[in-house]
Image (tube, grey):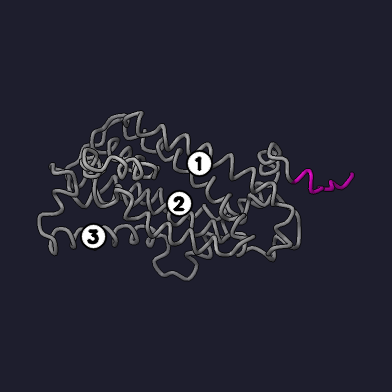
Amino acid sequence: MTNVVYTNAQQQRVWRVVPEVIRARELLFDLAKKELRIRYRYAIMGFLWAVLEPVAMMLILTFVFTMVFSGKADILGGGDARPFAVVLLCGLVPWQFLASGLSKGVQSLIDHENLIKKVYFPREIVPLAALTTCVVNFCIGYVVLLVLHKAMGGVLGANIVIFPLVFVIEFVLVVGLVLLFSCLNALFRDVGYIVGVAVMFGFYATPNFYTLDLVLRLAPNHPWLVRLYLLNPMAELNTAYRQVLFENRFPDVALLIWPGVLAVVALGVGLVVFRRRSPLLSDYL
């Protein structure tokens, strides 16, 4: 049996990503299980924290806009009979996946520098494994959202199965961004801080505790500002999630076009940049 020798040229080939990740799937599963164990090993409530984090944020914002700023919840929630708490959670669950995915994924290569320096394996496995806990938390939050929606008088129709399909677009987007920024962060540590600031800003620039309709009302007076706002793909994805949940229908295709295009572009750019720099990661870490 001959040993396989990986040259720098081979590591840079993008088409090798899928077959290499498949061959190294056991390592991917091991790292994913490790990520889950590390996050919840010493937590008494374990996976319950995946429920408490978005629920706690929901309760805080609900209190602020229903008690402190009395009457604002109806406006921010769309002005209809939708419970403000459910509207909030429907925005927070997808946003938390993106925010936590970027936070953990961008730092993942640095956190596993000892492993990367010791042996060759497809480096993409590290950021992918880092997203495991984020996917698990999203699934748990999604279930909590459905339970709360039903408990507060909402209707769950057959179209609720479309909700995960919208998530696929968000997942591809996050994977592409994580591959790109994790690689750049290994080369330039400032990238991690920049991403952190961008995520903090993005929370308010995304309709998490308000609806997209409120922003679109600014269009007649500030069209350039609305166009700039809509460059944020989460603005349209969060609205698509809410259409599926509250209107029980397939979201407007227009809401999925820009996020879908950006997700494909981000994945393509992320793979190319990551693969081109993969042979040099050990030197920079």
User: Please, what is the three-letter code of the amino acid marked with disc 2?
Assistant: Val
Residue 79 is situated, as x and y percent measured from the top left of the image, at 13, 44
Looking at the rendering, the stretch of residues picked out in magenta corresponds to: 1-11
Residue farthest along the right direction in this orientation = 1
**What kind of secondary structure does the magenta stretch mostly adopt?**
loop
> Which of labels 2 and 3 is toward the front?
3
Q: Is residue 146 left or right of residue 48?
A: left
**Tag shown at residue 203:** none
Q: Nearer the viewer, residue 235 or 23?
A: 235
Tag 2 residue:
136
Residue for point 36% across, 33% down? 162
Tag 3 residue:
61
User: Please, what is the three-letter code of the amino acid marked with disc 1?
Assistant: Val
Instruction: Tell me the CA gap for discs 2 and 1.
Output: 16 Å
Mark 1 and mark 3 lie on one chain; the one further toward the N terminus is 3
Q: Which quarter of the rendering shows the N terminus?
A: top right
Q: Is residue 164 above or below residue 147?
A: above
Q: Is residue 10 magenta?
A: yes
Mark 2 and mark 3 lie on one chain; the one further toward the N terminus is 3
- Helix, strand or loop at label 3? It is helix
Q: Is residue 7 magenta?
A: yes
Q: Is residue 41 left or right of residue 53?
A: right
Residue 240 is situated, as x and y percent measured from the top left of the image, at 32, 37
Tag 1 residue:
172
Q: Quadrant of residue 35?
A: bottom right
Residue 249 is situated, as x and y percent measured from the top left of the image, at 28, 30
